[in-house]
Image: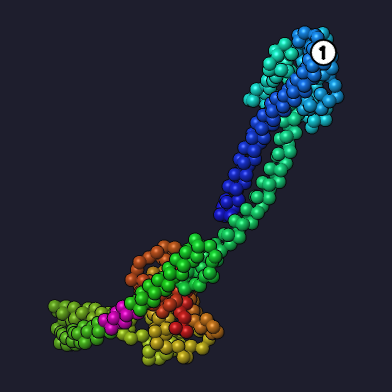
Amino acid sequence: MRLVLQLVARLLLIVVLCLGAATLWATFEAHRSVDRATAASAQRVAQALRALYWRELLLRSSRAREHLLPVPDWRTLETMKLISPGVCVEFQPAAAFEKPLCGQSEGLGATPPRWFAAIVPTFLGSHAEVIRPVSPRAASAGTVVATPDGAAAVSLAWEYILNVIDVALLMAAAIGLLASLAIAHALAPARAIVTALQRMARGQYRTKLPRFRSMELAMIGSAVGELGDRLEEATEQRAALTRRLIEIRDDERRALARELHDEFGQNLSAILAFANTIETASTKDDSTGIAQDARMISQATHHLMASLRDALKRLRNPLPDELGLEASLVNLVDSWRSQSAARPTIQLDLRGDLTDISGPAATTAYRVAQECLTNALRHGVAREISLRVERRAGEDDALLIRVEDDGGGDASRVARSNGYGLTGIRERVTAAGGSLSILPARGGLSVAATIPLAA
């Protein structure tokens, strides 16, 4: 899952939790607001009745205080204005058949759902009545009792919650949208970093990244740039070391070829001469079978000399140094064709101008073709082998060598092989700055090497 989506999902979860908390807070605050409105209504009515009480006391001072209760005159329109909606107020002691004086409770808001009307009293409890004395100094003046209407209180709480939630939802939507855009904008440079890492994985180590405003992303970009520089330096050092090792190995091969030619070649020639002499001398009297033994020695010597010649061909300097790449490839294919008529068909396809290709690139191309043909002929049961060498001109001046056969084989197993020959050509191609791939082909394997010529 993309990081932007993860962060947006977490942000939405936080917004939902905040909305839930806001709903709970709004419910609790609405419940408290009803209690506050009830207390305020009781206090305002009590103050109004207190003023009425003292006025009656001053105007009718001949009457006893206990008879100065302001019962007949307090239920007026002015008193109704002092009572909050959804609150009922009564005076104690109340007259017979006197009903409480209630504030306007119709049209307080939308009718709350049943589950809300059942949950609020269960968790927050019912509203308590509020009692206020008309006169703290005269208890006989009576008291004011304010009681909230339960249904009206729930309607007020629901209306309050709807108002708060509407605003909260709008704010949450705005915050979620703006935060998502901010997150996407902040993480946009990550795509450039990932692209640079992908290019580095393909071998383009020195990849320049733009300057990032964020300090953290700037540190990551700087680290990626330093990593690319170090990888480039390490690759160049490894390629130089590999080229040096290949040069040393070629020198040793040439030295070994000289030793084999000078020592083994001369000794084998001497053995063959002695065997021919013994065979000639024993021809007249072959009762002991010496001539037959001499002929067997000659045959074995011829076989050893043929093997030695093949080894010397592989150990000596490659033919591209003498004949050029194109002629050496033709000579390589012709030598394999001439060894046996039963061998598979070898198709040679040369494309592009190969005349000016020389030096390490020509040597590497020849060694790749030589090793691939040897493996296909010796280790497979191919009936047809295709060797294609193509020069791709242009900005990416490179040489493509592809060897395909229909002899079966597991491409993944061959690619994981640590054989000397395959390891050698892989090292050569890497040292030349190229690439080597082993893939399945139609009925067999395909080995392809790309060698840059611009270097």
Residue stretch rendered in magenta on the structure: 243-252
Please give the name of the residue rendered at 70% of the width and 25% of the height, measured from the top-left corner. 39
Q: Is residue 401 left or right of residue 367?
A: right
Identity of the residue drawn at 19% across and 81% down: 294
Q: Position of residue 112 (x, y in %)?
A: 75, 29
Q: Residues within 10 Å of mark 1 (few under 14, many from 20)?
A: few
Residue 244 in the magenta stretch? The answer is: yes
Figure label count: 1
Q: Is residue 159 visible?
A: yes
Q: Residue placed farthest to the right in the image? A: 77
The residue that label 1 is drawn on is 60
Residue 3 lies, in percent from the top left, at 56, 54
Image position, residue 337 (x, y; %):
42, 81
Q: In front here: 8 or 265?
A: 8
Q: Quadrant of residue 189?
A: bottom right
Q: Is residue 260 above or below residue 213?
A: below
Classified by dominant secondary structure, the portion drawn in magenta counts as helix
